[in-house]
Image (spheres, helix red, strand yellow):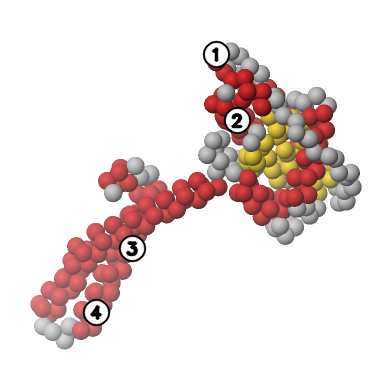
């Protein structure tokens, strides 16, 4: 409990004091009202003494009790928040895991038109180039380091309300609510450039990181699976065009795409 009190923010102290004071005042009000009703016809000296006891006892008893209960409820809320974060976060990179990313994007896409900017936006699929070679030549520890660097570069490039998730292996997803085709292309290029310029030194030797990015900008109602499919097709195009590049599809009110066979490109 002492650790919780020492590390508490100013806002936390304010909430703790507010609920402690309000709870204690509520107990005092009930106690005083009860004494006033029950002992109103007693002699004035006894009546005043009763009212004094009705004020002092709640302060002595209820004050510490409300302080303790409020502190414990706050600790419980913090613990629940940490569990929620752990359940939705990829432990290696710190971005959303696949399930949490898909759920949050899906929730934005399903909101009524006008309730969210997700009636238009863009979905980016980012895949590390030659990642198997990194693991084979430098080891999985450095492969993990590369993934952390890529995730950090993506996070520093996108906006605060954009969603970033690791979809599995060396593949990341980015959802840009409200972004136009031009916006999405600019963001994707910034991500690609940022990762290309990120220092990566496995075994104290400078190595080059790069990613291929497939994307889909959209207008109108779309689903997560459709956006993922279109972005995956564009990622396939970027890989076959030489990697370390962006390929973006523009989905307007209607879209017609020819399925492209997937390939194990890394």
- Disc 2 crowd, CA 10 A, few/some/many (<14, 14-19, 20+): many
Q: CA distance from mark 1 to mark 3?
A: 60 Å
Question: Does residue 190 show up?
Answer: no
- Disc 1 crowd, CA 10 A, few/some/many (<14, 14-19, 20+): few
Q: Quadrant of the C terminus?
A: top right
- Tell me which corner region of the image, top left, top right, bottom left or bottom right, holds residue 28: bottom left
Q: Earlier in the sequence, mark 2 or mark 3?
A: 3
Looking at the rendered image, the disc whose residue lies closer to the viewer, 4 or 1, is 1
**Residue 204: mark in rendering:** 1
Badge 3 marks a residue whose secondary structure is: helix
The residue pinned by badge 2 equals 147
Q: CA distance from mark 2 to mark 3?
A: 49 Å
Q: Earlier in the sequence, mark 1 or mark 3?
A: 3
Left or right of residue 91: residue 251: right
Residue 225 place in picture, x, y as percent: 75, 50
- Disc 3 crowd, CA 10 A, few/some/many (<14, 14-19, 20+): few
Q: Earlier in the sequence, mark 3 or mark 4?
A: 3
Which residue is painted at 68% across and 29% down in the image? Answer: 128
Left or right of residue 257: residue 178: left
The residue pinned by badge 4 equals 34
- Disc 4 crowd, CA 10 A, few/some/many (<14, 14-19, 20+): some
Left or right of residue 236: residue 47: left
Q: Are marks 2 and 3 in contact (CB under 8 Å)?
A: no
**Residue 22: mark in rendering:** 3
Q: Earlier in the sequence, mark 2 or mark 4?
A: 4
Above or below residue 172? Residue 73 is: below
Q: Earlier in the sequence, mark 2 or mark 1?
A: 2
- Tell me which corner region of the image, top left, top right, bottom left or bottom right, holds residue 150: top right
Q: Are marks 4 and 1 in contact (CB under 8 Å)?
A: no
Looking at the rendered image, the disc whose residue lies closer to the viewer, 2 or 3, is 2
């Amino acid at each position: 409990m002492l650790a919780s009190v020492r590390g508490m923010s100013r806002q936390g102290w304010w909430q703790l004091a507010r609920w402690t004071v309000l709870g204690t005042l509520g107990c005092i009000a009930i106690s005083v009202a009860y004494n006033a009703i029950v002992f109103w016809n007693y002699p004035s000296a006894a009546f005043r003494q009763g009212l004094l006891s009705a004020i002092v006892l709640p302060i002595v008893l209820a004050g510490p009790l409300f302080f303790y209960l409020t502190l414990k409820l706050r600790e419980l809320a913090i613990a629940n928040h940490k569990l929620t974060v752990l359940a939705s976060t990829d432990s290696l990179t710190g971005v959303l895991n696949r399930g949490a990313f898909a759920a949050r994007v899906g929730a934005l896409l399903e909101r009524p038109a006008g309730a969210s900017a997700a009636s238009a936006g863009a979905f980016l699929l980012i895949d590390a180039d030659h990642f198997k070679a990194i693991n084979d030549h430098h080891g999985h520890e450095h492969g993990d380091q590369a993934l952390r660097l890529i995730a950090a570069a993506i996070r520093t490039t996108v906006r605060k309300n954009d969603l970033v998730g690791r979809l599995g292996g060396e593949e990341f997803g980015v959802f840009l609510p409200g972004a136009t085709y031009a916006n999405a292309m600019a963001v994707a290029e910034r991500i690609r450039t940022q990762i290309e310029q990120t220092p990566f030194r496995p075994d104290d030797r400078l190595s080059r990181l790069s990613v291929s990015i497939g994307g889909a900008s959209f207008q109108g109602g779309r689903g997560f699976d459709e956006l993922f499919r279109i972005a995956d097709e564009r990622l396939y195009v970027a890989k076959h065009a030489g990697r370390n590049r962006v390929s973006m599809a523009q989905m307007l009110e209607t879209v017609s795409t020819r399925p492209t066979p997937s390939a194990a490109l890394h």
